[in-house]
């Protein structure tokens, strides 16, 4: 349940439009900063002169995509971003036919429910339902998270092609968020084997201390991994005594959503892919 570690953006060589590249870099930097960033912060992170950044910022401010805090003088993402955000979410068909299944899971479990999709080497939360009385989990729609330390991420990672897993380990690496985070390749391979055997993943305080998640994979009509669903709660809510029951509920939800994508009703989740990196 933790977001990916922010990384400074080095100057890029591109044959496209440099101004557009820089504007997108600014959005990505600001999206990982709750307090906002100054002109100097952005200039240093991008590795370009303040004058060049200032020119872009003025345009983005004028169009409403950025907002400047009058007290701190720091820049933040503007409300115009919400328009694009909402439009992007509405275009994700998965959310529409998953909605009733997610709500049923939330009502039956009394836990926060997440729906996440794979985007590159990360998962992105595209829906979140939280019971009124549920403990507040540090998640939100649009949050990007690592694969190796989240239940939705591990549920997806278990069915990735071996070469993609190896590239992830080699090029991106596995960030340690606390002492519970799995970062060793062999341990993650063993965890993948367990996930494929039992059909669900567990995040045991690996991203956020005090919280556990149970996640299951979602497949498309071709049996390819596309998304995952999970329930999240405190360690007092998700325990050794009820984890199997919760896992069955999440599995049923994931299978129902998978069938909605055209995934064959026959067969089991764990039989969908044979190319996961299990030694």
Image (cartoon, grey):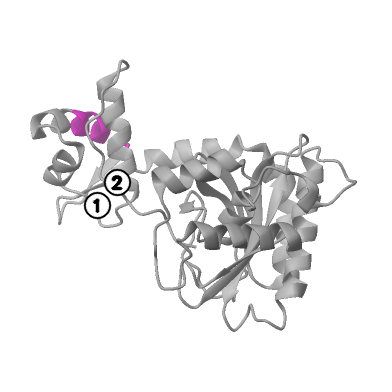
Residue 174 position within the rendered picture, expressed as x and y whole percent measured from the top left: 43, 55
Looking at this view, name the residue that lies furthest to the front: 279
In the picture, the disc for residue 136 is none
Q: Which residue is drawn at 33% across and 33% down?
A: 24
Q: Which residue is drawn at 62% across and 69% down?
A: 131
Q: Residue at x 57, y 43 (%)?
A: 118
**Whole-percent x, y for residue 40 in the image:** 11, 44
Say which residue label 2 marks.
30
SS at mark 2 in the image = helix
Q: Can see residue 104?
A: no
Residue 172 versus residue 185: which sits nearer the camera? 185
Image quadrant where residue 110 sits: bottom right
Q: Mark 2–mark 1 contact, CB under 8 Å?
A: yes
Q: How crowded is mark 1: few (under 14 residues within 10 Å), some or many (20 or more)?
A: some
Residue projecting furthest to the right: 266
Please give the residue where the numbered disc 1 appears in the rendered image. 36
Q: Where is residue 216 in the image (x, y as percent from the top left)?
A: 69, 57
**Prevailing SS of the magenta stretch:** helix
- Say which element carries label 1: loop
Q: Which residue range is magenta in the image?
A: 56-65
Is residue 86 in the magenta section? no
From the viewer's perspective, tell me whether residue 181 is left or right of residue 277: left
* Residue 141 vertical placement versus 55 (above, below): below
Residue 208 at least partly seen: yes
């Amino acid at each position: 349940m933790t977001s990916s570690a922010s990384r400074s953006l080095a100057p890029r060589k591109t044959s496209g439009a440099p101004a557009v590249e820089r504007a997108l870099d600014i959005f990505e930097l600001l999206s990982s900063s709750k307090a906002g960033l100054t002109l100097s912060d952005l200039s240093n992170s991008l590795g370009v002169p303040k004058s060049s950044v200032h020119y872009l910022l003025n345009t983005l401010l004028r169009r409403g995509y950025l907002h400047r805090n009058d007290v701190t003088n720091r820049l933040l993402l503007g409300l115009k971003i919400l328009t694009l955000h909402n439009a992007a979410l509405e275009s994700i068909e998965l959310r529409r036919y998953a909605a009733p299944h997610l709500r049923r899971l939330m009502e039956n479990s009394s836990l926060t429910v997440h729906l996440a999709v794979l985007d590159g080497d990360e998962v992105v939360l595209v829906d979140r339902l939280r019971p009124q009385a549920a403990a507040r989990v540090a998640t939100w729609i649009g949050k990007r998270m690592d694969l190796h330390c989240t239940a939705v991420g591990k549920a997806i990672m278990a069915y990735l092609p071996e070469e993609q897993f190896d590239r992830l380990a080699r090029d991106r690496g596995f960030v340690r968020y606390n002492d519970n985070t799995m970062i060793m390749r062999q341990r993650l391979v063993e965890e993948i084997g367990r996930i494929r055997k039992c059909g669900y993943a567990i995040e045991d305080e690996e991203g956020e201390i005090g919280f556990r998640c149970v996640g299951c994979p979602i497949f498309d009509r071709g049996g390819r991994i596309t998304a995952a669903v999970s329930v999240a709660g405190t360690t007092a809510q998700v325990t050794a005594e009820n984890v199997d029951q919760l896992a069955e509920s999440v599995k049923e939800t994931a299978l129902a959503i998978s069938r909605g994508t055209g995934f064959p009703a026959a067969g089991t989740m764990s039989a969908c892919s044979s190319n996961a990196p299990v030694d």
